[in-house]
Amino acid sequence: MANTLLMPKATAVWLVDNTALSFDQIAHFCTLHPLEVKAIADGEAAQGIKGLDPVITGQLSRDEIAKGEADSNYRLKLAEPKVRVPESKRRTPRYTPVSKRQDRPNAILWLVRNHPELKDAQISRLVGTTKSTIEQIRERKHWNAANLVPMDPVTLGLCSQIDLDLEVQKASRGMPAAEPTGGTLLPARETESLEVREDRDDQELDADAVFAKLSSLKSTQPEDDEDDNRY
């Protein structure tokens, strides 16, 4: 396992506050940029981070700090760890129980149909299959393609809902947002203008009705006068 510094920012905070080391020396030791170390010294960065003493944690000795303070060109070296932590093994493909392996093609078909944004590597991580099998199912060239039925891999127990949601979220990053298919509400200005138009139309209709009544009265008025003269 490579010997790396624990909590580099917290260590940088402690070195800035408690030593006379240069910004370049602290930046090199903590794998930070010199400007970032300068920002820590100015109080512009790492606010609220409590300094971590690398001497107490056994990652740096007092003699090493003294050498660095005496020579600004000296590069601090990490102390040898007293305890060796074994390296983590490389992540292997997801293991699928023998009893559920026959359901993998159905799960792959479900993922291909319902989540086409997923890449082959993501599907492989979810259900523990190979890219060649995924390609065969995509192109309907699988030996049992005629009998495959899409089935949710979460329901089959091949993966968890959290893992599926995470992979879908990763695949959806950077994709254009879907355009709304349903109707949307009109802006307030347009609705107000529509109401004004409707009021005007109603007023025009009322005016026409009034003029029609007046014209009908005028047409009947001479006949009434003749009847009065007869009597």
Image (cartoon, rainbow, N blue to C red):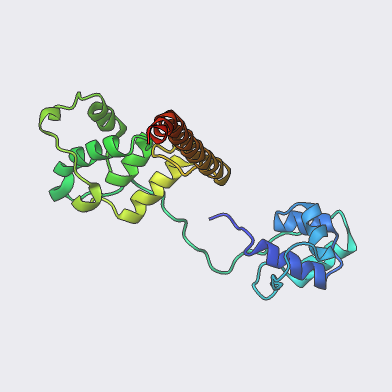
Q: Residue at x 84, y 64 (%)?
A: 42
Is residue 125 toward the left or the right of residue 191 in the image? left
Q: Is residue 148 above or below residue 11?
A: above
Q: Is residue 113 above or below residue 167?
A: above
Q: Residue at x 69, y 63 (%)?
A: 9
Is residue 3 toward the left or the right of residue 203 in the image? right
Q: Residue at x 81, y 71 (%)?
A: 17
Residue with the most extreme bottom position = 56
Residue 61 position, x and y percent, is 73, 70
Count of labels shown?
A: 0
Quadrant in the picture for residue 140: top left
Considering depth in this image, is 152 or 16 the residue closer to the camera?
152
Quadrant of the snapshot with the C terminus: top left
Is residue 40 toward the left or the right of residue 57 in the image? right
Residue 137 position, x and y percent, is 23, 29
Considering depth in this image, is 67 or 8 the residue closer to the camera?
8
**Residue 70 seen anywhere in this rendered image of the structure:** yes
Considering depth in this image, is 198 or 174 the residue closer to the camera?
198
Quadrant in the picture for residue 134: top left
Residue 40 position, x and y percent, is 79, 63
**Residue 175 seen anywhere in this rendered image of the structure:** no
Considering depth in this image, is 206 or 185 the residue closer to the camera?
206
Residue with the most extreme front position = 231
Q: Residue at x 66, y 67 (%)?
A: 59
